[in-house]
Image (spheres, rainbow, N blue to C red):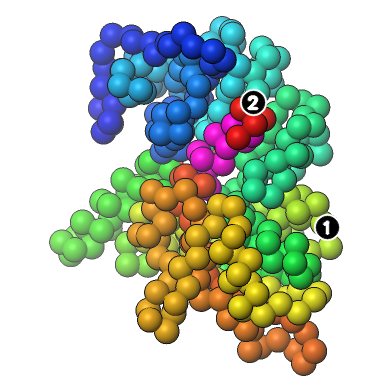
Amino acid sequence: MRSGLTRRPTAVYTRAMTRRFKVAVVGATGLVGREMLRTLEERAFPVSEIVPLASPRSAGMLVRFAGADVEVQPVSEAAFEGVEVALFSAGAGPSREWCPVAAKAGALVVDNSSAWRMDPDVPLCVPEVNLDAARTRPKGIIANPNCSTIQLVVALKPLHDAAKITRIFVATYQAVSGAGAGAVASLEAQQRQLAAGQPIERGALPGILAGNLLMSWKVDPATLYQEEELKMIYETRKIFGDDTIRVSPTTVRVPVVNGHSEAVTIETERAISPEQARALLALAPGVELMDDFAQGIYPQPRDASGKDAVLVGRIRDDLGRAPGAHGLSLWIVGDNLRKGAALNAVQIAEGLLLGR
Ligand SMILES: NC(=O)c1ccc[n+]([C@@H]2O[C@H](COP(=O)([O-])OP(=O)(O)OC[C@H]3O[C@@H](n4cnc5c(N)ncnc54)[C@H](OP(=O)(O)O)[C@@H]3O)[C@@H](O)[C@H]2O)c1
């Protein structure tokens, strides 16, 4: 039996108050799904009934929500009856199949997978940047961007508004929790094997990550870009509503459990100084400045893990920019399970249904 999950009789969380919503979490036994349950609870999202759904493998298991054990059901058409909000984090295949079913049942659907992100009839939303885009949803589905893209656009939005970003160079240092619960368990096993001098087994990982780095996302044979990199290019453009932004990403998996980091350099149309950028970012929604590098202060994954805010530091002039060109370098760190997935999805529902 997996940690945090037990088998016991059903319990349902209901509370009769003003406007409350029946909420389904699809993928409720996964890393993002469990973070969604925590996030709904912590932010006191008005839930009348929670419906945790997963694959048939998890049927009968229990997840905790609002002080009760709630039984996980296998996803099915009947499970969406009366559901008003459906938050999906079960992978692209199940999302392709079940998001339209949930939308047809009348639910506001927010999907974390890559299934719908580039569909022109599906808004791709980060509330700090483009909540209004989510108000028009021809398919009844709203897509949550890739975790690396979310933290990037949250931090860059105020700089884009002030100076118009024309180009983004980004290298990511992505935590293993971004690849799901199985990948986290496999890294922990690999680290034990490494320390014991034993042969290292891949487990659920595509290679050896303990003491190593991997670039193991699916490769597009035409461009030799990893799919994760292409997501950062096209999702950034869609969210900013600007197809002219040029994005040059390299995505890397690092042996960190949680919290993605990004080394970013931007070119801008108009001049912007590090001081101006700091002043803008200090006031930006969803951003926390951690920028006193001379004193050794800069964001680290351990700082970001468990936090809502995207942390930004190391803001500096880009010494490599061409004469007459404008640009800055910065370091952006965020909790990929939280703002990179669960929190962003819950914020979309809050923005649309509660006006928060
Ligand atoms: N991890 C991140 O930082 C992150 C960030 C942004 C987006 N996402 C996206 O969120 C999704 C989930 O990621 P995760 O990290 O939470 O993965 P995970 O820990 O592996 O969890 C996967 C979840 O999906 C469920 N599931 C798998 N196949 C299913 C099916 N056929 N029908 C119904 N449920 C099914 C699993 O249920 P069982 O337990 O029954 O197998 C489990 O609850 C993925 O699409 C991922 O790309 C993840």
Describe the element under mark 2 as helix, strand or loop: helix
Question: Could you say which quadrant of the image residue 87 lies in?
Answer: top right
Residue, x 61% and y 27% (percent of image)? 354
Residue, x 49% and y 27% (percent of image)? 45
Q: Name above or below for residue 97 compared with residue 156.
A: above
**Viewer-proximal residue, 319 or 294?**
294
Q: Which residues are magenta?
A: 340-351
Task: State the predominant SS element of the stretch in magenta.
Answer: helix
**Viewer-proximal residue, 121 or 217?**
121
**Residue 342, magenta (yes or no):** yes
Image location of residue 72, percent across then percent down: 40, 17
Separation of disc 1 and disc 2 at Cα?
Answer: 30 Å
Kind of residue at disc 1: Asp
**Marking on residue 243:** 1
Q: Is residue 90 left or right of residue 150?
A: left
Mark 2 nearby-residue class (10 Å; few <14, some 14–19, many ≥20): few
Image location of residue 235, percent across then percent down: 70, 51
Give the total number of marks visible in the rendering: 2
Q: Quadrant of the N terminus?
A: top left
Image location of residue 340, percent across then percent down: 53, 48
